[in-house]
Image: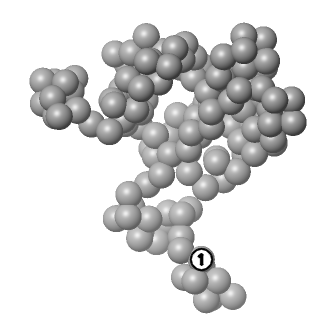
Amino acid sequence: MDGGTEGGPMKAAELFVRCLENEGVEYIFGVPGEENLDVMDALVDSSIRFITTRHEQGAAFMADVYGRLTGRAGVCLSTLGPGATNLVTGVADANMDHAPVVAISGQAGTIATSSSHSPSKPLPTTSSAL
């Protein structure tokens, strides 16, 4: 598939951002990180404005309020693991209020998750030392 930023094949993150643009997304609220770096790079050439928050929970609540006020989907973005779980309260609140929210979480590749310092570990490996 052609159409990437440098004339080469399009990356999945670029396609993902293009899909969000086609859905009329104007803002993404969130916390940038290593796991969502490709999405952040794709947003550089996008009409979507990224609003940096100090905490993922704040991003989810901002997306919730945006959805309630506009009737359009509010989008929040987090990193993996604890970052994703930090979205839960805001997303649950949006669900209870029937506000349109899309929550996106980054994920490291399988090579990165096998390193010893990664916060994303398979459960059997993590619990076997207990």
Up-down relation of residue 83 to residue 103 (above or below): below
Residue 125 pos. (x, y %): 54, 82
Secondary-structure class at tag 1? helix
Q: Is residue 59 rendered to the left or right of residue 13?
A: right
Res 41 seen here: no
Residue 35 pos. (x, y %): 46, 46
Up-down relation of residue 99 to residue 126 (above or below): above
Up-down relation of residue 80 to residue 31 (above or below): below
Quadrant of the drawing holding the C terminus: bottom right
Q: Is residue 80 rendered to the left or right of residue 34?
A: right
- Place residue 102 in its image quadrant: top right
Q: Residue at x 19, y 24 (%)?
A: 3
Q: Is residue 1 rendered to the left or right of residue 66?
A: left
Q: Residue at x 61, y 89 (%)?
A: 128
* Foreground of the two, 28 or 114: 28
Q: Residues within 10 Å of mark 1 (few under 14, many from 20)?
A: few
Res 124 seen here: yes
Question: What is the three-letter code of the residue carrying label 1?
Answer: Leu
Quadrant of the drawing holding the N terminus: top left
* Foreground of the two, 74 or 28: 74
Residue 21 pos. (x, y %): 44, 18
Q: Residue at x 58, y 83 (%)?
A: 124
**Mark 1 — residue?**
123
